[in-house]
Amino acid sequence: MPTYTHSYSIPRVSWAAPSNIALVKYWGKKAFQLPANASLSITLSKAFTQTTVSYESKKVKGLEFEFFFEGKENLKFYEKLKIVLSNLSKELPFLLDYKLRIETINTFPHSTGIASSASSMAALALCLCSIEKEILGQEEDFFKRASYLARIGSGSAARSVYGEFVQWGELEGEGSDFYASKVKAFHQKFSQFRDTILIVSSEEKKLSSTMGHKLMDDFSASQERYLQANKNVLKMLQALKSGNLSVFGEIVEEEAFSLHANILSSSKGEVVLLSPNSLEIIERVRKFRKEKKIDLYFTMDAGPNIHLLYPKNQEVEINSFIETDLLKFCHSYIPDEMGTGPWKII
Ligand code: PMV
């Protein structure tokens, strides 16, 4: 008697989305998931999240999903995702008609101030966009839609659906608060730009972005901060276009200190994110830059880690400085660089 094997496969999609580091920071909201100021980031390449979503239609309407982080079910992330998916289902009503299985892996430790929410929410949004396209047909502007959806999960994720330099937030009648877009022109001095991420501590973040954005609501200097950021985006666009590395450096460092100063001040000194090792690294970078007259700049996210930003043509000297003078203050590091954006796996 012949044996029949019944094989059917559940449809699935999979995307990899890189993290990004803000050169001009988004810190403060004006309404639900809408930024109080414009921001601008560089997309990374090695630090990314890969997400696979399998979707199976079901009869009973309602949100139903399983979530696996690095192969294991993770209740903490599941609860966070439940809120995100419920918000997203207002935009994507089909989510209520399917049972989802979401599997995700990161190439870097989560919750260390490397924006894992940016890459993970971007990867998820791209998967959901692909499913929407499968079920409902062609999406007119796929990446714009993905950016719009990613923003609902995490603001900075709106910028992770594109490569190179990305801008988010309406400014002087251009751009949008609802989705990000690629910076159109940048000088070749910025191509293959390096970002070596020094992981000073791999401990979980002390301050969630949600709390941080909220602190800005009641902060007396928040309006000045929003104006400063908008001005810095305009200045940065100019610096990127003309290839002015020193103006680029001035802006990124001012932005990094402004973020940390605002966190310190708005929390009335309760939240101190930089560690003694972060400060030691900053000191050494400044000294080296002055001595060698080299284009090595730094920025930070809302955590103790330091992103070192520098052009490719100066990498030999800078990499050897990092190895001999800085790595001893770090837990680990990721030698990353500017990337071309997300890619579809399945
Ligand atoms: O995307 P959120 O809500 O996690 O906020 C990100 C905030 C910063 O990473 C500190 C700055 C930014 O623009 O990415």
Image (cartoon, grey):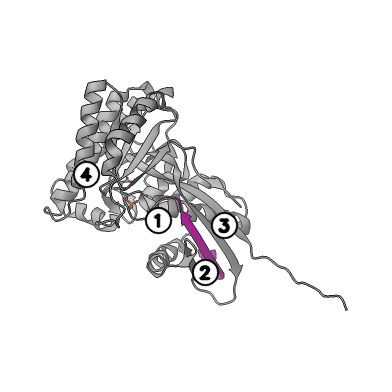
Cα distance between the residues tagged 3 and 4: 46 Å
Q: Secondary structure at mark 1?
A: helix
The answer to which of marks 2 and 3 sits earlier in the sequence is 2
User: Looking at the image, is 293 positioned above or below residue 99?
Assistant: above
Q: Which residue is mark 2?
A: 96
The answer to which of marks 3 and 1 sits earlier in the sequence is 3
Q: Is residue 174 left or right of 288 when viewed as pictured?
A: right
Q: Are marks 3 and 4 in contact (CB under 8 Å)?
A: no
Q: Which residue is mark 1?
A: 152
The residues colored magenta run: 92-107
Disc 4 versus disc 1: nearer the observer: 4
In percent of width and height, residue 343 lies at 54, 45
Residue 211 image-quadrant placement: bottom left
Label drawn at residue 132: 3
Residue 78 image-quadrant placement: bottom left
Residue 314 in view in this figure: yes
Which residue type does callout 4 highlight? Asn
Which residue type does callout 3 highlight? Glu
The answer to which of marks 1 and 2 sits earlier in the sequence is 2
Q: Are marks 4 and 2 in contact (CB under 8 Å)?
A: no
In percent of width and height, residue 219 lies at 15, 51
The answer to which of marks 4 and 1 sits earlier in the sequence is 1
